[in-house]
Amino acid sequence: MASEQRLVARSGDKLDLLIWREAGLGPAEISRVCDANPGLADLGLILPLGTVVIVPATADTAATRVLPLIQLWD
């Protein structure tokens, strides 16, 4: 089972960009991340520099980052 991740916002980061870049998560995970970070949505569209965002642990977090293997002869 994966452990929770703590991500730190860079200058100009939006939540979707931060969780994609650092955790490989897509837009479907935004509500789960917001639930784990009360008040995060109140910070605005662009996160303040240094904002810590907690990504809760799930069994499938690591699997989300794995891309399917595509072979030319498939």
Image (spheres, rainbow, N blue to C red):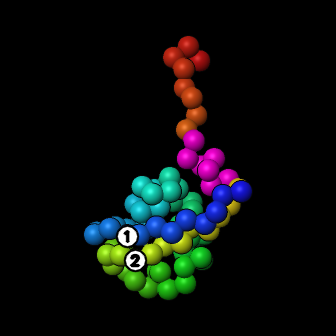
Which residue lies at the image location 60% right of the left edge and 77% below the top edge? 35
| Rendered image: mark on residue 9 | 1
Q: Is residue 72 above or below residue 67?
A: above
In the image, 58 versus 70, the foreground residue is 58
- The image position of residue 31, as x and y in percent, is 57, 70
In the image, farthest residue toward the top: 73
Q: Residues within 10 Å of mark 2 (few under 14, many from 20)?
A: some
Quadrant for residue 12, please give it.
Answer: bottom left
Q: Earlier in the sequence, mark 1 or mark 2?
A: 1
- The image position of residue 38, as x and y in percent, is 55, 84
- Residue type, label 1: Ala
Where disc 1 sits, the SS reads loop
* Disc 2: which residue: 51
Q: Are marks 1 and 2 in contact (CB under 8 Å)?
A: yes
Q: Which residues are magenta?
A: 60-66
Where disc 2 sits, the SS reads loop
| Rendered image: mark on residue 39 | none
